[in-house]
Amino acid sequence: MLEKYSIGSKIILLTLFAVLFFMVLRYVTKLFEMAYVIKHKRPLYTHFYIFKRKLSLSQKSILKKKFTFYNKLPFQYQVYFEHRLASFIKDKDFLGRQGVIVTEEMKVLISATAVMLTFGFRDFYIGLISKIVIYPKEFYSKSNNAYHKGEFNPKFRALVLSWKDFEKGFEDGKDNLNLGIHEFTHAIHLNSIKERDVSSTIFSDSFKELSEILSRHEYLREALISSEYFRRYAFTNQFEFLAVAIESFIETPHEFKSQFPRVYNKVKQMLNFNFAGY
């Protein structure tokens, strides 16, 4: 059938057929994944990289020495983590304030916190963040004219942290107080509302399901409050509840699961955490 066409016309037709084929294939794949997500509440796949970025020797040394989560991962997942960490660092601008000189350790540990929280996501960049601003300690925020240890400002796409308090969050890995986890959770939460990628959709929809469960079951809400497992600040609003819940999920997963299995499982579903003992 193609014999009556010139070579140029054949090339154009073949190109059009190829484009059409890939469009149909992409559409079918999306439909298949949608069905998979509805059934299993997780992405069809999470990690697939043709080329993997590498950390420098100094970055990898910091990660091994100071980031417990990384050391809990199987070797292949550590390779994925390193690729994501190198990619995240490259994607963000790190800015020091009030005399802070941004060090390799700051970049690695702050970025590793973001990579840890999104390790079950396919898209791990948290697009609402373009810059990470680091103060030496508590800083004055014009957003509400008060001193903060950390904040996420979506208008300026900035995550702002007190380095002193960020470090303090990792001194005790069992107190359910971690500034980095808390502030990155706010960013991930807002990003999931804005974006429509599969992981953001799962995160957002799962949080809605959790909110409905808590709304319907007064006994569960009262149990959460009376147990004092979550600090009082968690009950300020839904954003703070989620941030505190994820702090607790990361730091004391076994206690969380034991006391509130239904809430734990929803948080696990939101983050797609099926590794490192979670």
Image (cartoon, rainbow, N blue to C red):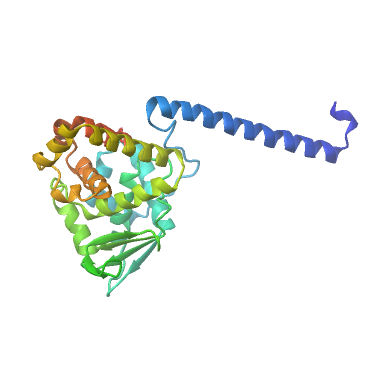
* Furthest-bottom residue in this view: 99
Residue drawn 22% across the image and 68% down it: 146
The percent coordinates of residue 264 (x first, y second) are 23, 34
Please say if 179 is above or below 261. Answer: below
Quadrant of the image containing the C terminus = top left
The percent coordinates of residue 55 (x first, y second) are 38, 52
Residue 28 appears left or right of 169: right
Please say if 44 is above or below 60. Answer: above
Residue drawn 40% across the image and 61% down it: 155
Please say if 128 is above or below 47. Answer: below
In front here: 36 or 174?
A: 36
Please say whether residue 42 is visible from this viewpoint: yes
Count of numbered circles in the view: 0
Say which quarter of the image contains residue 203.
Answer: top left
Please say if 230 is above or below 141. Answer: above
In front here: 50 or 170?
A: 170
Quadrant of the image containing the N terminus = top right
The percent coordinates of residue 261 (x first, y second) are 20, 30
Please say whether residue 83 is visible from this viewpoint: no
In front here: 275 or 31?
A: 31
In front here: 190 or 212?
A: 212
Say which quarter of the image contains residue 169.
Answer: bottom left
Residue drawn 38% across the image and 26% down it: 40
The percent coordinates of residue 109 (x first, y second) are 28, 55
